[in-house]
Image (cartoon, helix red, strand yellow):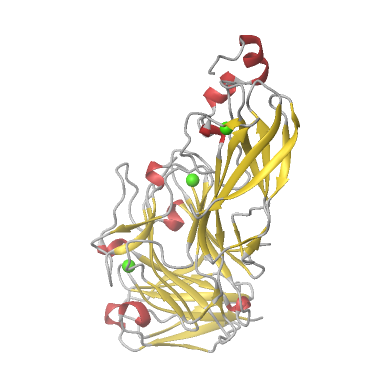
Amino acid sequence: MKKLLPGFLLMSLIPFTSWAQQPDIPQPLYSAHIFTPGESPSYLLLLYDNDGGISGVNSIPTFQCNTSLTPSVVIQNFGSNTLTTAVLQYNIDGSAPQFIEWQGELAPFFSDTILLPELNVAPGTHTLNVQVTEANGETDENELNDYSVQFNIVGTSEEAPYHENFAAPFLPDGYFVENKNSGPSWMITEINSQQNNSSCIMMPFYFNDSDGDEDFLYMKNLNLTNLSSVFLGFDVAYAYYSEFYFDELRIDASINCGGSWEMLYDKAKNELATAPFTDVPFTPEGSQWRREWVDLSPYAGFDNVLIRFDAISGHGNNLYIDNISVDENTSVDDVSGRDNRWVLCPNPANESVQLNIADPSYHESVRLYDYIGRLVMSMSAEGKSSFSIPLKSTPAGTYVLELMDRDHVISCEKLLVVH
Ligand SMILES: [Ca+2]
Ligand SMILES: [Ca+2]
Ligand SMILES: [Ca+2]
């Protein structure tokens, strides 16, 4: 029988005002909400005499490499009667349900933890659904406190060289998105201006008004044992919204399945932008793409390398990524068919490096980036077939030299600076 919670209990248990001020907290009337690990639902009303619910699922990371997991679920009494028996039903992705009978003694709002049997799941994105079907021997009528949590199993790593141009209208196998607030996030979209095919991946920052929100795009995990030097390449297109509303893109890598991450790339605002800022949703023209290179050489030889794109929202404007490559060389021939004729000498270099360009007629500039993608130097290459770049004041390390025409990267080379 439905009833309203007495006012004093409502006020003592539920921070109504704080809930109303925090729209990111899952609201109690949305049964369709899918939780991510660590997120907890909130419940406001004791509407039923006998009502068991699930208030949390533990030991389900957002992703893991192991294909078996042993979650525990938190059963909570949302009814006004003491809960002494309950039947839990659970399944993965809507498959045949399994049942667990629970016995105990829970006063209203008290909870207990139940360990589920080991679950074995195939690589991919999955949803674990847990619900209480019976409470105190009666059918549990309140489904709003059932629980679903999404997780990802990382499969066997794919051997590099690796290329992905997002030709299909859905995320490629082995990719997944971590979006804690369930807002607008990484998605496949179509941009007519893009080369190869019109599909690419987009982070709709324009529509994400949650400042500081992080959305992760995980690439297919890769086996780099056959490569001695490795570069991650990708096309990017981005415009920010205004002087005060701009976003950030980071790239991290992990060799222990996400146990720890190293940041390899970090750009925002002008460094990230490929087009002038605009206050309408940004869609790139063909000339508004730029090829980026990230040195993955420290990861050469590892057999399970996980790479993620970390989109940090500043409520700016849309970001696009396409034509991801993980390969030994940085020639863009692989992805765009452009010419690549230049020589760096010496390499490694100490005081300077000499550039010899076969056809100087359509090259405009050379840019030098450091290991995490920060622009170190930019100089004109217009009409020059040979020139020298001074490196005396450039710290020793790994760099990337880009040869540009007016809008595009023509070619990239890895440059080692030693002193
Ligand atoms: Ca229930
Ligand atoms: Ca594409
Ligand atoms: Ca988000």
Left or right: 309, with 192 as reference point: right
Quick check: 414 above or below 7?
A: below
Q: Position of residue 92 (x, y in %)?
A: 54, 54
Q: Nearer the viewer, residue 13 or 419?
A: 13
Q: Nearer the viewer, residue 350 or 281?
A: 281
Quick check: 98 above or below 212?
A: below
Residue located farthest toward the right when viewing the structure as drawn: 105
Left or right: 402, with 286 as reference point: right
The quadrant in which the N terminus is found is top right
Would you identify the image quadrant in which residue 234 lies? bottom left
Residue located farthest toward the top when viewing the structure as drawn: 7
Quick check: 66 above or below 31?
A: below
Left or right: 268, with 260 as reference point: left
Q: Nearer the viewer, residue 324 or 390?
A: 324
Q: Is residue 242 visible?
A: no
Q: Nearer the viewer, residue 297 or 217?
A: 217
Left or right: 256, with 347 as reference point: right
Would you identify the image quadrant in which residue 131 lies? top right
Q: Position of residue 271 (x, y in %)?
A: 45, 57
Residue located farthest toward the left when viewing the structure as drawn: 192
Residue at left offset 35%, top offset 48%: 277
Give the total of numbered labels. 0
Q: Position of residue 336 (x, y in %)?
A: 31, 77
Residue at left offset 50%, top offset 69%: 220
Q: Is residue 69 visible?
A: yes
Residue at left offset 64%, top offset 53%: 60
The quadrant in which the C terminus is found is bottom right
Q: Position of residue 393 (x, y in %)?
A: 61, 72
